[in-house]
Image: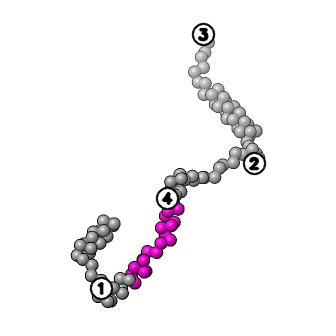
Amino acid sequence: MSKININKINDMDAIRLNRQNDLYQVGKNNSPTVENKVKIGEDKLELSPKASEFGKLIEQVKQFPDVREGKVEDLKIQIAAGEYNPSSEEIAAAIMKDEIGR
């Protein structure tokens, strides 16, 4: 009766080592040179026409002053002269407009 060798670990280790060497050689021989490397593109942002238009409008709004100096001066003059008399409805509407805008 012949012996059957169940323990093939040594053979598997040899195959695994040969395969690793083969892969190492392939990687070593085919490593890209500086000229062959793929250039990675830069990130790029493209805006839709509406987004672009919106950005332009935002820039235009930023150019407006926060305080309308002419309006403030007119009101100061009216108050000083006793001519500024808003109705209670105007005051309430202004308060509500301010609250809703928050």
Q: Is residue 68 magenta?
A: yes
Kind of residue at badge 4: Phe
Picture quadrant of residue 73: bottom left
Q: Residues within 10 Å of mark 3 (few under 14, many from 20)?
A: few
Q: Element type at marker 2?
A: loop
Residue topped by disc 1: 83
Q: Element type at marker 4?
A: helix
Residue topped by disc 2: 34
Residue topped by disc 4: 54
Question: Which residue sits at x=63%, y=28%?
Answer: 12
Q: Element type at marker 1?
A: loop
Tag in front: 3 or 1: 1
Marks 1 and 2 in Cβ contact (< 8 Å):
no
Question: Which residue sits at x=27%, y=78%?
Answer: 86
Kind of residue at badge 2: Val
Name the residue nearer the viewer: 11 or 97: 97
Q: Position of residue 61 (x, y in %)?
A: 48, 67
Q: Position of residue 36 (x, y in %)?
A: 75, 44
Q: Element type at marker 3?
A: loop
Label 4, label 3: how far apart the Cα atoms are: 89 Å
Q: Which tag, 3 or 1, sits closer to the chain's start?
A: 3
In this rendering, does residue 52 appear at all?
yes
Name the residue nearer the viewer: 17 or 2: 17
Q: Give the residues in magenta.
A: 56-73
Q: Residues within 10 Å of mark 1 (few under 14, many from 20)?
A: few
Q: Residue furthest bottom?
A: 81
Residue topped by disc 3: 1
Q: Which tag, 4 or 3, sits closer to the chain's start?
A: 3
Label 1, label 4: how far apart the Cα atoms are: 41 Å
